[in-house]
Amino acid sequence: MNGKAHFRRFFAADPDRLHVAAHSHHPWPDVTYDAQMRCWEDAASLADRKWAHLFADTWPALQQRIAAILGLPDPTTLTFGPNTHGFLLRLLSCLPTGRPIRVLSTDGEFHSFTRQIRRLEEAGQVRLHQVPVEPLAGFTERFVEAAARRDADLVYVSHVFFDSGFAVPDLAALVEAVRESEALIVIDGYHGFMAVPTDLAAIAGRAFYLAGGYKYAMAGEGAVFLHAPPGLGPRPRDTGWYAAFTALEDSAAGEVAYATDGSRFLGATFDPVGLYRLRAVLDWLDEAGITVAMIHAHVQALQQRFVAGLEMLNLPALNAKHMVVPLSIAGRGHFLTFRTAEAGAIHRQLLAANVITDFRGDRLRFGFGLYHDEADVQRLCRALAAILE
């Protein structure tokens, strides 16, 4: 798969850079440059009418593309926004008041969720129960048990955990175990969308799904989406005026009106350029016949080559026994995580050689994508050999 040829502008900006942090900031393919220019041109030619164009053209096109990728039966359950935090706040605003919100989650969630929930816990507005992600063997069983025996208002769990790359093997089992019928179930799909083949058809009527363009959708910031199952969270208290665009005008007793599709979770004015980029990426992949399964297979092959290269180097600080998610676990995302006390030092030494990785505490992450090939893996191994041997 010759994906590299589609990222010429990013590579030309720094030809000597080796970027192996697709899970952090994925390079943008060349089609996003033209899309960004098209957004500006639409603003110039359409002025105020650009919003009507967005909602009549780009918006439904994206809904169709994403619904097809995720196996969603109804594209109108999807809505868009600038960041996941805004959607999280609206989801929280659907939950009961007058008592602490009961939240069931894990100890491996991303900061956009964890920081907000912990602050609400400090304020006495949340009672949080976290299921440990590790040991990875048995995680599904632990979460299912916790969901089956606890009442929860909000159940929030990642599909692929950001600090390890572990992919939950059976999302449906987690969803089906939630015993509280009124609970909102939210799957954070940000590190799985466009990386791990995902079919939400079986749980589309019960679980929310949250993801966006910054990681493996290759579209950058400002292009986040939420799948909102019909009937769940019908009237978020945190609501922006964009949520009124498709709302019914005859709400009972003059109450604030809400649509029944995903637009009930809309906020207010945003910069639409990220949606232009996201559409361009998804259109390009579709026209090129490149599927998520093909990208996933490409990345898994690179991961195998990388680990084989490390075995040949026999580096004490970085080898297969340090992997949080070993290759023997098929359920993994597009980055490999190594637990080592030298994570920060290795990251900084690689950065000095213009090799981009990232680390979280004692976890060093190497991410691969469509824009990598075997030569990149070989260069990465040479760079590691130079600083660690």
Image (spheres, helix red, strand yellow):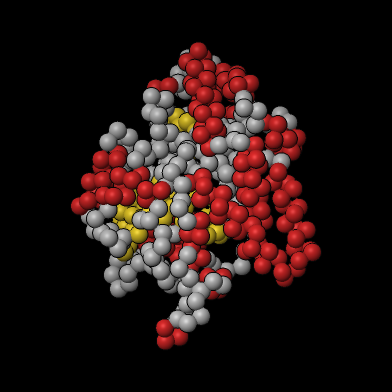
The reply, left or right, for residue 26 in relation to residue 190 is: right
Q: Please name whichever residue, 342 or 1, is drawn nearer the observer in this view of the structure.
A: 1
Q: Is residue 308 above or below residue 137?
A: above
Indicate the quadrant containing the C terminus: top left, top right, bottom left or bottom right: top right
> Looking at the picture, how far across and down is residue 354, in whole percent?
66, 31
- Does the image show residue 18? no
- Does the image show residue 128? yes
> Looking at the picture, how far across and down is residue 53, in whole percent?
68, 64
The reply, left or right, for residue 174 in relation to residue 158 is: left
> Looking at the picture, how far across and down is residue 11, in whole percent?
71, 34
Q: Is residue 144 above or below residue 113?
A: above
The reply, left or right, for residue 26 in relation to residue 300 is: right
Residue at image location 33% in from the left, 45% down from the top: 172
Q: Please name whichever residue, 259 or 386, is drawn nearer the observer in this view of the structure.
A: 259
Residue at image location 49% in from the left, 17% down from the top: 308
Indicate the quadrant containing the N terminus: top left, top right, bottom left or bottom right: top right
The reply, left or right, for residue 202 in relation to residue 223 is: left
Q: Is residue 131 above or below residue 327?
A: below
